Amino acid sequence: MPTIVRPATSGDLAAISALLLQDAAERAASDGDLWPLASDASQRVAKTLSVEMRNEGSNRWLVAEVAGAVEGVARLGVIPCPPIYHLAGKRVFLLYDDTIVSSSAPNGALALLVAAAEREGAALGAISYLAACAPFQRDKRRALESAGYGVVTDYLVKHSLSSGASPAGVRAAVATDVPAIVEMGAQSQEALFQANAQMWKPHPEARARFGAWMHFALTLPDRCILVHGGHDGAGFVIAQPASAFHLPLTCDRERIGLIDDFWAQDFATAKEPQGATHAGDLLKAAELEFVARGRTSAMAICPAGWRSKQDFLRAHGYRVGNTWMLKA
């Protein structure tokens, strides 16, 4: 029987929920600490679907149907480019983690879903295409690779977080630290650009925009900006909550802390990860911040092409938990 890809409707809710809960079980079997099942997972799925299937916002749902049965689902979003990067005002397509097919789906069903999702994204103005894929999802990765995607970002995770006293050289940032953080951010953005110029082209106004965001972030109670030492630019890290972009709907995000902006001079100068003393202090302080907020795991975003940062994180107990893939 042919596979038909179409927009999801309210009549698909039960089938989609079943697929996503089966995916949640597979994720828990792969890494239950990274993919903890939310106690209200079914309600979350139902609530999100009820909103997004009415095309409220920039997310869309598609299903793959075979002989009247839903055998696959794709959740896609078209999102603005982060303001410190440059896509000339265009938007970014994201194929969320909530994109799967059943074990009984015909060969090629996932490829059809991916292609249809991309067409939907193009119609919504996307010019850059990203897709989430966990390491255990080998069939999904093969389908994405066949469609021209390659790993661009690793989400490195650690479950046994640091304990003890916070390193003496690390403190919470204050407003007078922002100029130094902006300069460090510019160095980080250059390293990102070197890792993948397609993904991380800095915006001409990146410094001003990043500075404005740092001043605002200092007022947000759900995160902490940490700096090393005085105002000399040795390093900074932001310990923040995981967002809806980075985990599937069924996952209990409250247990996961996220490290995105993280720079230390060690990443540019240290020849051995063990020599990265400033970075090590900042990372430990971020993990302690997560523990204090009741989080049990940390996820650090790191470009696949930023080798010094990759090596550092792996030397400190992090390993790949998820990936984002970019279409070349």
Image (cartoon, grey):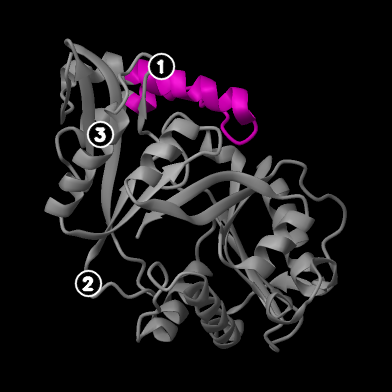
Q: Which residues are magenta?
A: 17-45
> Could you tell which of marks 2 and 1 lies nearer the N-terminus?
2
Distance between the Cα atoms at labels 1 and 3?
15 Å
Left or right of 206 on screen, residue 12: left
Residue at (36, 85) in percent of width and height: 205
Residue 234 position (above or below residue 24): below
> Could you tell which of marks 2 and 3 lies nearer the N-terminus?
2
Q: For residue 89, which numbered disc appears in the image?
A: 2
Query: Circle 2 — which element?
Result: loop
Residue at (73, 55) in percent of width and height: 314
Residue at (72, 41) in percent of width and height: 159
Distance between the Cα atoms at labels 2 and 3?
27 Å
Left or right of 213 on screen, residue 49: left
Name the residue nearer the viewer: 6 or 214. 6
Q: For residue 8, which numbered disc appears in the image?
A: none
Write down the residue under mark 1.
Answer: 103
Residue 4 position (above or below residue 190): above
Residue 156 in the image, given as x and y percentages of width and height: 62, 50
Of tags 2 and 1, the one toward the viewer is 1
Mark 2 and mark 3 in contact? Answer it, CB < 8 Å: no
Distance between the Cα atoms at labels 2 and 1?
40 Å
Residue 260 in the image, given as x and y percentages of width and height: 55, 61
Number of numbered labels in the structure image: 3
- Label 1: few (<14), some or many (≥20) within 10 Å? few
Write down the residue under mark 3.
Answer: 113
The quarter in which the N terminus is drawn is top left
Residue 138 position (above or below residue 200): above
Query: What residue type is disc 2 on?
Result: Gly
Query: What residue type is disc 1 on?
Result: Ser
